[in-house]
Amino acid sequence: AGTLGAAAAEKGRYFGAAVAANHLGEAAYATTLDTEFNSATPENEMKWDAVESTRNSFTFGAADQIVGHAQGKGMKVRGHTLVWHSQLPGWVSGLGASDLRAAMNNHITQVMLHYKGKIHSWDVVNEAFQDGGSGARRSSPFQDKLGNGFIEEAFRTARAADPAAKLCYNDYNTDGANAKSNAVYAMVKDFKARGVPIDCVGFQSHFNSASPVPGDYRANLQRFADLGVDVQITELDIEGSGSSQAASYTTVVNACLDVSRCTGITVWGVTDKYSWRSGGTPLLFDGNYAKKPAYTAVLTALGGS
Ligand code: G3I
């Protein structure tokens, strides 16, 4: 296979990119996306502030544009994200507990019903744990007003809305074994033991020199898979360039291929030109859409050429 998506498919996996609706009109952007990737994640367009900036008034235009484009090209779509402390409209933060619970469940239900049957995996809850050594939950309107049970409630509501979608918990700095990933692990283990619906764990995998690919990356993916969930690499990008960046990408792809329940990889953007790391070069295509050494490394690791 000569593309990332086709090579991944031969390994029984998808290879996706985060997509921004406002770049789809740029020919090189759309061509690169359509040629190379077989899964798309809206980078911002499905977040709460984008789809429900006013209570119970939903605007799906930009997200629909991405979903329509992806479906027209035969790509799968990941849903990102339903419950997150960031990009959250002010009206949500101002609610009291019972109102907040109702708003959270309504948001999950309405968004998932709108896309029912079109999303292969949803990031139901994003980034609910703190960094550092505590393993504690992150402060957020949901955590502070609803308590630890908000995650479980969100997953139960999501299962009812679209029973066919895979339901994921997604986070960063959980890529190796550490206090944060141990806390997520304990939650997933508890959910599986109690029958709380969860199907997958997303490992964002934003790497740079201060936070490189951990030595136990594969082992960490495997220990989660051993709990009976799929694992997905959901927002991969690796700062750097040349052969060292390429080598890190190879490590990540090989780790996913080594874990049978690692079902796919998404890179967090199509081109360095539009990376969220402004001025950074963490992706597979450079600012002119030329293939980087990292691209060749990924394709080779996937068994393509
Ligand atoms: O759309 C508005 C525009 O109307 C406004 O004029 C402009 C002025 O600041 O802002 C635009 O919104 C920006 C938005 O991206 C769309 O471009 C926001 O400021 C900016 O903060 C936002 O950044 C996004 C970031 O999440 C916000 O938290 C990045 O694009 C996006 O790549 C990033 O993605 C996150 C994942 O969702 C979760 N994991 C971490 C990852 C990287 O931070």
Image (cartoon, helix red, strand yellow):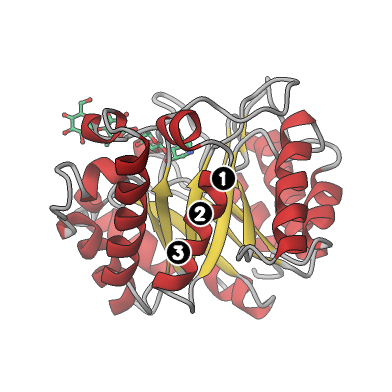
Quadrant including the N terminus = bottom right
The residue carrying mark 2 is 153
Q: Position of residue 93 (x, y in %)?
A: 31, 30
Near-viewer residue (158 or 235)? 158
Position of residue 144 relative to residue 159, above or below, is above
Which kind of residue does numbered mark 3 sit on?
A: Ala
Picture quarter with the C terminus: bottom right
Q: Say which amino acid is labelled 1.
A: Gly
Crowd around label 3: few <14 · some 14–19 · many ≥20 (10 Å): many
Kind of residue indicated by mark 2: Glu
The residue depicted at 70 percent of the width and 43 percent of the height is 184
Picture disc at residue 158 = 3
Q: Residue 36: image x %, image y %?
A: 46, 65
Dots 1, 2 in contact, CB < 8 A: yes
Q: Distance between the Cα atoms at labels 3 and 1?
A: 14 Å
Who's the residue at 32% across and 34% down the image?
87
- In the picture, measured across the screen, residue 19 lies left or right of residue 265, that is left
